[in-house]
Amino acid sequence: MNYWLTYFEKSGMTESPDYHNSVKYFEKFEKNFPSVKIKDIGITPQGRKLKVVIISKDKAFTPLKAKRTGKAIVLIQNGIHPGEIEGKDACMLLLREILVTKEKAHLLDNLILLIIPVLNVDGHERLSPFNRPNQNGPKKMGWRTNALNLNLNRDYLKADTPEIQSFLKLFNEWLPDFMIDNHTTNGADYQYHVTYGIEKHQNIDRGLVQWIKNKYLPYLHCKVEADGFIIGPYMEFKNGAIESGILDLPSPPRLSHGYCAVQNRVCLLVETHSLKPFANRVFSTKSMMHHTLEYLNDNVEEIMALNIQADKNPLRNYLTEKKKFPLILISNGKFEKFLFKGFEWYDEYSEITGSMVRKYTSKPVEIEIPIFNQAKSLKKIFVPEAYLIPQEFESVIKVLNYHQIKLTRLQNDKMFKVERYRFTNVSFSPRPYEGRQLPSFNTECFEENILLPKGTYIVPTKQRALRVIINLLEPDAPDSFAHWGFFNAFFERKEYAEAYIMEPYADIMLENNPTLRNDFYKRLEFDEKFRNSPLDRLDFFYQRSPFFDTRENVYPIMRFISKSGVDF
């Protein structure tokens, strides 16, 4: 049995192996069991190979063969944040119990497992005992971001990184029935050994929501607590303090569980507690995975049927029945009471910070706090039949291809009646976020008849990934191309009119246009900032002149609202 001891166990449960030795351990399974196959899925920025371990009793090592088995596909991802690495070690132990000791061999009766040992391999190899000051072990751990200093768990929709591009290829080819993403959380001290995030709001199919709330989560709580681990929802506090309450609100698709939701799939985000010993975190993660697989294995037909229906429902709801799509989700301010299991705390003045600092004791307490777990739609939209993308936006098309969105192209020039957006109140974040300068804006919709040239891309919304399409292409969506800065150039003015040219032209405009003259003098009367700004006053006329660039602040992607004379 010594052959199957993990590095974690040999170290006295205080260490995790580097990537080379991690892969070597998984290769033992491949060498000894024909039901295991390891495949390369990509290359990291520093040239390391990304791996996936496929476990199938039927040797169904391709997506096509896997689908033919009728079994549910479960994807387990580890090490997207490599300092939070216990999922990798827990997977080694769980696989040993499935394949070697066979005490959990039945989990392969109805399931096929895909395990990514480490997604952020470059970050994993940036080992140090000092990478996570809030964390209790292992002795050395990896770094949060990849070699490009980007956080992979903000990249699922925009797909800037090679690692996520590789992940998306794997995900969309296999289209798992369930995903588990293993993490460790920072923040307050509390009794919970393990917490979880899972989508239960308007960003995921209602049938899956009912399954999560009424069946899966009650089962998971019962079984994990029977293993001796205290389990609760992910602890994100409203104002950063426990007493302000827990936020349990929709996650954007930049995150793993938010991305799965827009793919009509459930993702369990496992978040062990960073202050608990490393061994406790490994075993609580293993418990979460084991009981999730147990439930899925026992209820395989139900989850697969729910997923099939979840793929159909958006097409019926938003295209056939013309319901409005919930584009922006926020808290409705309502909450339920939650019995929080924490440790007694106190706030103490610090000479270091010059402010109060929260400190925790080891005395357990239970207090009632609010949990804000209801969302409302701040904005809803009607889903168009298609989006039209000019062919020059190859960077956008590349991302759509990563998500395996179906596209066609115009074979000839054609007239379209479209809806377009104009950006207003544009501003930019003072610092970059994930390497991008993020804009903030409002939008105004207008209609236009436009001749689009041959080669224009057509993105029909009548496809399984409708939610992905909307979240990328609707500019007001929180993780849209527009909000991630893909179209920042369209906020810039590229031509100008000098005052000595524009001022006499403005005189002529005033003389010949009574409506414009009235608008100008009203603005002078009621807008002090405008009245006192020579540049704004001149710009008033420039924007209304034939010299003004009509593409400034106009979103170049169009919504197709009429099929008149057009064949997709």
Image (cartoon, grey):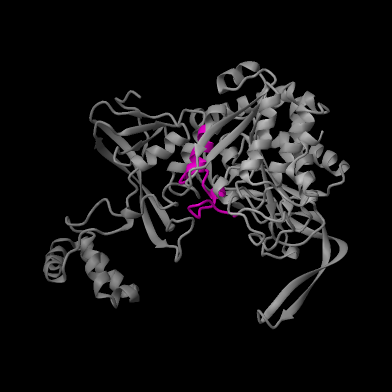
Quarter-of-image position of residue 105: top right
Which residue corresponds to the image point at 33% horizontal and 57% vertical from the top-left?
491
Residue situated in front as seen by the camera: 493 or 526: 493
Q: How many marks?
A: 0
**Residue 522 placement, left or right of 205:** left
* Residue 419 x, y percent position in the rendering: 35, 41
Image height check: is 63 above or below 262?
Answer: above
Residue 69 appears anywhere in the view: yes
Image height check: is 299 above or below 184?
Answer: above
Which residue corresponds to the image point at 30% horizontal and 70% vertical from the top-left?
523
Residue situated in front as seen by the camera: 351 or 519: 351
Quarter-of-image position of residue 552: bottom left
Quadrant location, the N terminus: top right
Which residue corresponds to the image point at 60% horizontal and 49% vertical from the top-left?
124
* Residue 88 x, y percent position in the rendering: 68, 42
* Residue 182 x, y percent position in the rendering: 68, 44
Quarter-of-image position of residue 63: top right
**Residue 166 placement, left or right of 194:** left
**Residue 141 placement, left or right of 428:** right
Residue situated in front as seen by the camera: 521 or 478: 478
Q: Which residues are magenta?
A: 143-169
Let me know if residue 528 is in the magenta part. Answer: no
**Residue 489 placement, left or right of 303:** left
Residue 77 appears anywhere in the view: no
* Residue 561 x, y percent position in the rendering: 37, 34
